[in-house]
Image (cartoon, rainbow, N blue to C red):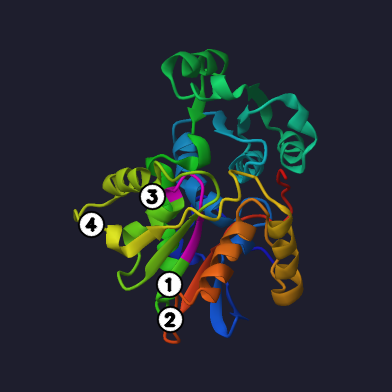
Amino acid sequence: MSIRLSLFDKPDALKVPVHTITMHQHPIQLIRFDLLHPEYGGNKWFKLKYNLQKALSEGRKTVISFGGPYSNHLYALAAVCRDYDLQAVGVIRGDAHYLSNECLNFCRSAGMALQFLSKTDYAQRMHSEFLNTLYARYPDAYIIPDGGDNDEGLKGASEMSMYIPENLTQLFISCGTFATISGILSKLSHHISVWGIPVLKAESWAAEVIHQQLQRLLKDGRDRSAQYQITTEYHFGGYAKVNAELKAFHSSLKIDYGIHTDLVYGAKLFYALDDRIRRNSFNELDRIGVIMCGRPSFGAES
């Protein structure tokens, strides 16, 4: 059952369920942010909350953001804007043939207007020339970067740390824009080591992005680089890319552990965890947690 969410509730009013499974004889604590709301739970709620508070306080009527055709971020934005009587606009990387997928079907049904861009044009989306065209069409717009990756999004993501059990020593987080892992790291207890699992090809830039995000968040100047590692071998070819092995593993999660998660983020996250346990990356004293954020039914590309 989902929990009622309000943009204006204090963080300590929220209770995040924690479930435990056993994987290869290791107890694993599942931190179920995904159960907070059926449409905009997970990390998306935290990264949108302060953005939408700001949009409402400024009297904006339209909220614009960006993402791929399977974007959980845009799905959540469409739903929460519907519930707060805001016009949502999604700028999509790709063409209109993706309109038939579940994500974009939902976005349209929730009232989100969609604009498609080629990959070349999408790469220019945050340049002033393109942003000016958006403001010309939507003069009252509030614009949120992909995945909620701005100061408001990072502030919200940092609040997720308060729901992480203190007995953990290892924490697994899937990564897209890296705003969630950076936000959590900024306030996470120092004894917990974090494994960031990118779901896209990020070998050349992930560390620098996290460094920059943490610099925006941290006031104490402390270096967090020893507290986390980014493991880039589990993206299966890139964002929303899967193969038969990952699909089979995804099915086994449901059968063996009762875990219903998505292919784009969750399956890769648990595959990494399973592989690291099999490779003896942990000892019997380790207490392992997994941040669960995504929706279970989104598709992916083979």
- The magenta segment: 172-179
Quadrant for the N terminus in the image: bottom right
Relative to 190, residue 104 above or below: above
Q: Earlier in the sequence, mark 1 or mark 3?
A: 3
Q: Earlier in the sequence, mark 1 or mark 2?
A: 1
Q: Would residue 103 be seen by someone viewing this image from the given angle?
A: yes
> Which disc, if any, is residue 223?
4
The mark lying in front, picked from 4 and 3, is 4
Neighbour tally class for label 1: few under 14, some 14-19, many 20 plus, Cα within 10 Å: some
Taking 119 as reference, is 205 left or right? left
Q: How far is the residue under mark 4 from the one under mark 2?
A: 23 Å
Q: Secondary structure at mark 2?
A: loop
Which residue in the protein does label 1 denote? 170
Asked whether disc 1 touches disc 2, contact meaning CB atoms under 8 Å apart, the reply is yes
> Which disc, if any, is residue 286?
2
Q: How far is the residue under mark 1 from the one under mark 2?
A: 7 Å
Residue 79 image point, x, y percent: 66, 43
Relative to 54, residue 211 above or below: below
Q: Would residue 158 be seen by someone viewing this image from the given angle?
A: no
Quadrant for the C terminus in the image: top right
> Which disc, if any, is residue 155?
3
Q: Secondary structure at mark 4?
A: loop
Residue type for callout 2 = Asp
Residue type for callout 3 = Lys
Residue type for callout 4 = Asp
